Image (cartoon, helix red, strand yellow):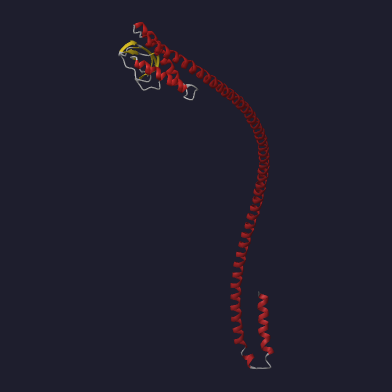
């Protein structure tokens, strides 16, 4: 700073001498000028000091900033190291997780393959079982169909046999009714009116009831059915003309106090307390309004 001051003073001394030839007044104004220069130098010195003070302040701030930067660099360096360490740990964990995931994936794929194989085996077994059941059921159905067909054939044979027996029974009963009718006509022509004569009438009445019961069990399409029904109707008319009456009881309600010999059977299809005559072994026969034979019947009840 002293060096700069000397140079400035030298310039101020030399400058008037250099300008002396131009103006003599400069020499005489030199003290005033010198004073002005010194004042300017003083001001400059003051400014320089201020600038130096500001410079020192700036340097201190710069040093503080540098210290802060150093501290920040240290912190950043430390953070970088920590981040690198954390990143390595994360990478290691990710590698471990990838290993575990790969292991689990392989295990899962193996389980899927095992379960798929089991499912295929179970499916094949189910198919085989279903096929076996199908063939067994089909075989059973075929057997049952054969059995049903045989039963049907047997039923048809039985029906045919039954129809033949019914037709034969109708023929025999028709002949029997004709014989009874002839016997009645013969008896009427001989005018036999003794009590002993009722034996034939009672026998014929028993057979008529039996034949009527059989006719109820037959289909009207049986050969000879209509002819036998007509014969029974004629002989009953002959009975009525000669004073005999066969009391109709089949299908009528049974009442306590009836003069009959009753056999009771249980029938759940009847109403509670209902009693119905469902069978006649011997009919009640009246002669001229007087009972000469009591009935033997079957009563169904609930």
Specify whether residue 6 is in view: yes
Coordinates of residue 35 in the picture (x, y in percent): 59, 84
Depth order, front residue of 193/37:
193
Left or right, 107 with respect to 232, comes to right
Q: Residue at x 42, y 18 (%)?
A: 232
Left or right, 161 with respect to 265, comes to right
Depth order, front residue of 238/202:
238
Instruction: State the count of labels.
Output: 0
Coordinates of residue 175 in the picture (x, y in percent): 47, 15
Depth order, front residue of 122/189:
189
Q: Residue at x 61, y 86 (%)?
A: 33
Quarter holding the N terminus is bottom right
Coordinates of residue 82 in the picture (x, y in percent): 64, 50
Coordinates of residue 159 in the picture (x, y in percent): 53, 22
Q: Is residue 118 above or below residue 86?
A: above
Quarter holding the C terminus is top left
Residue 5: name its quadrant. bottom right
Depth order, front residue of 217/97:
217
Q: Residue at x 38, y 17 (%)?
A: 236
Q: Residue at x 46, y 17 (%)?
A: 174
- List the single residue furthest toward the front: 189
Q: Is residue 9 above or below residue 215?
A: below
Residue 118: name its quadrant. top right
Specify whether residue 246 is in view: no
Left or right, 242 with respect to 218, comes to left
Left or right, 46 with respect to 260, comes to right
């Amino acid at each position: 700073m002293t060096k700069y001051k000397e140079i400035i003073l030298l310039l101020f001394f030399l400058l008037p001498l250099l300008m002396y030839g131009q103006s003599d007044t400069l020499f005489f104004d030199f003290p005033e000028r010198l004073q002005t220069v010194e004042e300017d130098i003083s001001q400059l010195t003051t400014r320089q000091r201020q600038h130096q003070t500001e410079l020192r302040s700036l340097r201190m701030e710069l040093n503080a900033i540098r210290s802060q930067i150093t501290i920040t660099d240290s912190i950043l360096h430390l953070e970088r190291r920590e981040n690198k360490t954390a990143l390595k740990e994360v990478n290691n964990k990710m590698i471990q997780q990838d290993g575990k995931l790969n292991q689990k994936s392989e295990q899962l794929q193996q389980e899927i393959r095992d379960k798929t194989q089991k499912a295929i085996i179970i499916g094949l077994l189910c198919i085989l079982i279903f096929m076996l059941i199908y063939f067994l059921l089909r075989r059973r159905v075929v057997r049952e169909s054969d059995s049903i067909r045989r039963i049907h054939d047997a039923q048809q044979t039985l029906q045919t046999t039954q129809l033949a027996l019914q037709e034969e029974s109708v023929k025999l009963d028709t002949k029997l009714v004709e014989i009874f009718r002839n016997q009645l006509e013969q008896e009427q022509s001989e005018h036999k009116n003794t009590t002993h004569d009722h034996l034939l009438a009672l026998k014929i009445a028993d057979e008529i009831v039996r034949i009527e019961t059989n006719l109820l069990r037959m289909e009207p399409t049986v050969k000879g059915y209509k002819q036998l029904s007509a014969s029974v109707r004629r002989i009953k008319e002959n009975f009525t003309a000669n004073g005999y009456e066969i009391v109709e009881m089949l299908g009528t309600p049974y009442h306590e106090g009836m003069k009959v010999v009753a056999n009771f059977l249980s029938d759940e299809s009847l109403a509670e307390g209902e009693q119905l005559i469902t069978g006649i072994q011997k009919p009640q026969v009246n002669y001229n309004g007087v009972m000469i034979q009591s009935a033997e019947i079957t009563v169904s009840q609930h």
